[in-house]
Amino acid sequence: MYPDDIKYHKEHTWARVDGNKATIGITFYAQETLGDIVYIDEPEIDSSTEAGIELTQIESTKATSAVISPVSGKILEFNEDLGDAPEIINEDPYGKGWIALIELEDESELDKLLDAGSYEKYVEEEVKDK
């Protein structure tokens, strides 16, 4: 359920790193909690984002939520497929449902993110606390 080649943020976003770029999305847990996703705001291309800060907004049939960036950097790309079919995030959150591609500003931030096992434990604790 949580791929090993990804780093996870406690705000239920993920980063898959390739060189100095990171593909960003929301986790399986996040999409499951949100329910049917109906819209996502396109982040501004070529703008900067910071780790722990809102990257964009996502709307579901239940709520509107902030998508928190797990890393800092320049937004290079938005997954245009989500404009017409935001439900792709529900169907494939770690593949076709990616949200943005970011050029990393500070690769050491990756050390603050969780690996798959740690994130899974974090989610289990969060569910127990609800």
Image: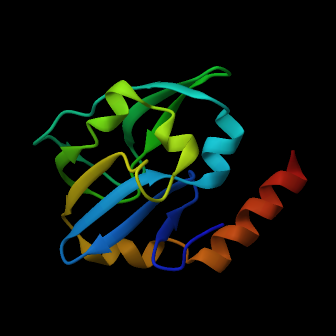
User: In this image, 93 relative to 24: left or right?
Assistant: right
Residue at image x 46%, y 78%? Answer: 5
User: In this image, 16 relative to 5: left or right?
Assistant: left
Where 98 sits versus 42, above or below? below
Count every numbered label the image shows and give the total.
0
Where 51 sits versus 17, above or below? above
Q: Residue 84 placed where, x, y %? A: 35, 25
Task: Specify the quadrant of the image occupied by residue 118.
Answer: bottom right
User: In this image, 22 relative to 92: left or right?
Assistant: left
User: In this image, 111 relative to 3: left or right?
Assistant: left
Q: How is the image coloured?
A: rainbow
Q: Quadrant of the N terminus?
A: bottom right
In this view, the residue in front, 38 or 41, is: 38
Q: Quadrant of the C terminus?
A: top right
Residue at image x 70%, y 40%? Answer: 33
Q: Residue 76 placed where, x, y %? A: 15, 50
Q: Residue 124 placed where, x, y %? A: 81, 63
Q: Residue 57 placed where, x, y %? A: 43, 29
Residue at image x 58%, y 58%? Answer: 10
Where 125 sits versus 127, above or below? below
Farthest residue toward the left? 46
Residue at image x 52%, y 65%? Answer: 8
